[in-house]
């Protein structure tokens, strides 16, 4: 267990597996549970295991957590509330194909943002690795036919998911400046902030007539997003960023559409084509290139 906790590649791959599942259930949740309701209840449910597990760490770290409450609030609102609210709304208004392409921009945004706001430097190999992984994402989006990319039309949902990706890239960069507390204390503080800042969104949804009673599928979606993406994957991702930095960790995000395609084949019975193999090779190869680029973003 200790060796796994020190292995950033394993942690980040597991993170992207959970996120890939999140992408699938996010689409399946359409019509089963309202987006702001899902965002708020996700953190309300996730807070239970988070606070139970984090209680010893919070008791030790509380003075530091309290001193950095503004950081916790901003990170929870940006990386947790805003990203998920925009993601769930976008899932109602755009295709999974477009969602995959736009999320593939995150590694480049992280590298650029780390350079602009942290003064970080990235090597040519890191840039090449990010580009290679994005080519893998494009291969999935094109489904083996580059002409499909030219035919894509971007709508309101695409704009929303792009804004969400920008916010999560900012969250990823912000983890570099995290206070010196345990990952569990950090997660607990940001999860509380996410729940508090998401409640007004649910109130607005109810007042505007957008609320729907969750179906059985909607409740199943809630359980998954609360325990997987909201709990386990956040711990893994923060630890991965801590070990190798935001630039190299961000490259792994491009595994999400690849794993999503594989899950679609296994769970939804969609055919597995040659372009999936090509895409997987490009993404994994890009990550390998980026890992060789440096031991992390220089400050």
Image (cartoon, rainbow, N blue to C red):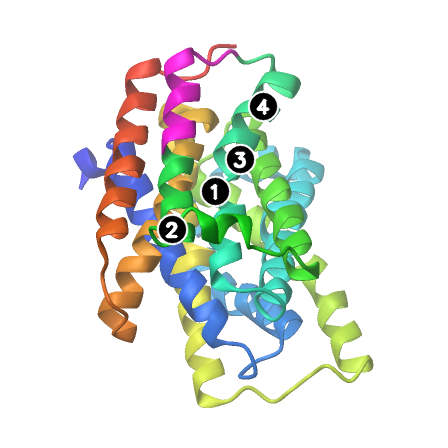
Name the residue tied to disc 3: 172
Q: Residue at x 65, y 20 (%)?
A: 117
Q: In the rendered structure, does residue 123 fall within the stretch colored magenta?
A: yes
Q: Is residue 18 above or below residue 121?
A: below
Q: For this view, does 192 lie left or right of residue 27?
A: right
- Mark 3–mark 4 Cα distance, whole angstroms, equals 12 Å
Which mark is nearer the camera, 1 or 2?
Answer: 2
Q: Residue at x 34, y 45 (%)?
A: 255
Q: Quadrant of residue 63?
A: top right
- The x, y position of residue 224, in whole percent, is 40, 69
Q: Is residue 124 above or below residue 166?
A: above
Name the residue tied to disc 1: 104
| Sooner in the amino-acid sequence: mark 1 or mark 2 | 1
Mark number for residue 112?
4
Name the residue tied to disc 2: 145
Regarding mark 4 in the picture, which secondary structure is present there? helix
- Mark 1–mark 2 Cα distance, whole angstroms, equals 18 Å
């Amino acid at each position: 267990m200790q060796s796994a906790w020190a292995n950033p590649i394993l942690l980040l791959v597991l993170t992207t597996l959970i996120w890939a599942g999140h992408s699938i259930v996010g689409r399946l949740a359409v019509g089963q549970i309202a987006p702001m309701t899902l965002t708020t209840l996700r953190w309300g449910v996730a807070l239970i295991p988070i606070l139970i597990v984090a209680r010893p760490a919070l008791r030790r770290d509380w003075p530091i957590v309290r001193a950095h409450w503004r950081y916790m609030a901003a990170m929870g609102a940006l990386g947790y509330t805003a990203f998920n609210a925009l993601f769930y709304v976008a899932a109602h208004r755009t295709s999974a194909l477009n969602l995959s392409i736009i999320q593939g921009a995150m590694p480049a945004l992280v590298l650029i943002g780390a350079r602009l706001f942290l003064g970080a430097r990235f090597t040519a190999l890191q840039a090449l690795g990010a580009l290679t992984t994005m080519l893998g994402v494009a291969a999935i989006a094109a489904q083996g036919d580059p002409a499909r990319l030219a035919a894509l039309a971007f709508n309101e949902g695409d704009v929303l998911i792009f804004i969400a990706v920008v916010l999560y890239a900012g969250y990823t960069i912000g983890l570099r400046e995290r206070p010196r507390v345990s990952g569990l204390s950090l997660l607990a503080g940001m999860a509380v902030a996410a729940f508090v800042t998401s409640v007004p969104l649910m109130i607005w949804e109810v007042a505007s007539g957008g609320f729907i009673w969750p179906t059985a599928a909607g409740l199943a979606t809630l359980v998954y997003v609360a325990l997987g993406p909201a709990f386990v994957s956040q711990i893994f991702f923060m630890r991965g960023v801590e070990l190798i930095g935001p630039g190299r960790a961000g490259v792994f995000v491009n595994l999400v559409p690849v794993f999503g395609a594989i899950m679609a084949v296994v769970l939804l019975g969609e055919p597995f084509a040659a372009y999936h193999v090509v895409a997987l090779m490009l993404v994994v190869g890009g990550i390998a290139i980026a890992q060789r680029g440096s031991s992390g973003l220089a400050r």
